[in-house]
Amino acid sequence: MKDKKRAMGRGLGAILSAESKATVNSATDEGADKFVGNIVEVSLEDIYPNASQPRTYFDEKALNDLAQSIKNLGVIQPITLRKDGNKFEIISGERRFRASKIAGLETVPAYIRLVNDQELLEMALVENIQREDLDAIEIALTYQRLLEEIGMTQENLSQRVGKERSTITNSIRLLRLNPDVQNAIRSGEISAGHGRAIISLEDAESQKILFEKIIKNNLSVRQAEQESNLLKNPKQTAPKNKTAIPNNYKKAEKNLADILDVKVEIKTSANGKKGKIVLDFKNEAELENILSHFK
């Protein structure tokens, strides 16, 4: 009964034969058609992680939750592997691979790709941008690697990942932040919008001052941008208090500012029945970023 349950649990495809593992290494080899486009079961012992994987941290609780799901339902989405002799290197799906090991599985369903190393790296990086919940710094590092190691232009990268060029440019700029600020973004202590407000300052001391203010006073992205402007123009006085608006409008301002990464202001008439929303952008890149949300 136990063997029957195992077979049903992995019944998405056939187990790789020893001959296939030994002889099929490229798309021109005999039997390659059995790999390409098909789902096969691969022993976990034959799989090793991709050294080019941009994700370096895997939440232990999330892995255990996924392992429990795999115990109950099996691996619903196959992982993707590159054949490397008798072994297989992960292109995408390392979380599922790790969770499957925790769940006690012996094999995992997989798509096998027969590709060269550059294609492997590109697929792994693009796959992570599109499917994994990477933090803003990991995404920026991934963009940078695609530009530097694969040799993509920003235009090609924009088309490949389906993002505006301005979005990619603004993302990569975050890598100019000092390590403390980058770590705060990675941990969720501050947002990428806060990071962009900080990087708009040219000198390291001003960046440090703004970062500490954001943490100490729990500033919103909009407030951080205002503080950034004051640090750029020390003689400029703090903005005057505008006419008070309802709390739900204030919340809407903050939500929009966080989404669009620009200053947002809701202005209302004296009776509060009419008003307008003002989006404050500093350059063409920020305007393109705003417009990309409405396409």
Image: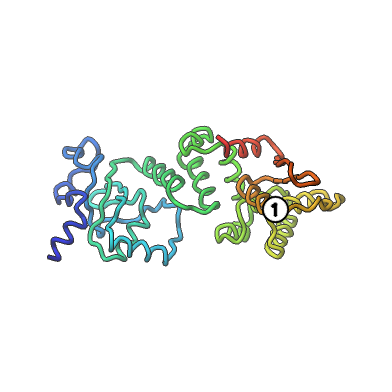
Please tell me in which quadrant of the rendered image residue 206 appears.
Answer: bottom right
Residue 134 vertical position relative to residue 275 in the rendered view, above or below: below
- Identified by mark 1, the residue type is Lys
Position in image of residue 109 (x %, y %): 25, 52
Position in image of residue 164 (x %, y %): 55, 37
What residue did someone put label 1 on? 250
Position in image of residue 237 (x %, y %): 86, 51
188 left or right of 116 in image = right
**Badge 1 local density, few (<14 within 10 Å), some, or many (20+)?**
some
Quadrant location, the N terminus: bottom left
Quadrant location, the C terminus: top right
Nearest the eye: 161 or 154 = 161
Quick one: SS at disc 1? helix
Position in image of residue 17 (x %, y %): 15, 50
Residue at x 68%, y 63% (from the top left corner): 215
63 left or right of 237 in image = left
Q: How many marks?
A: 1
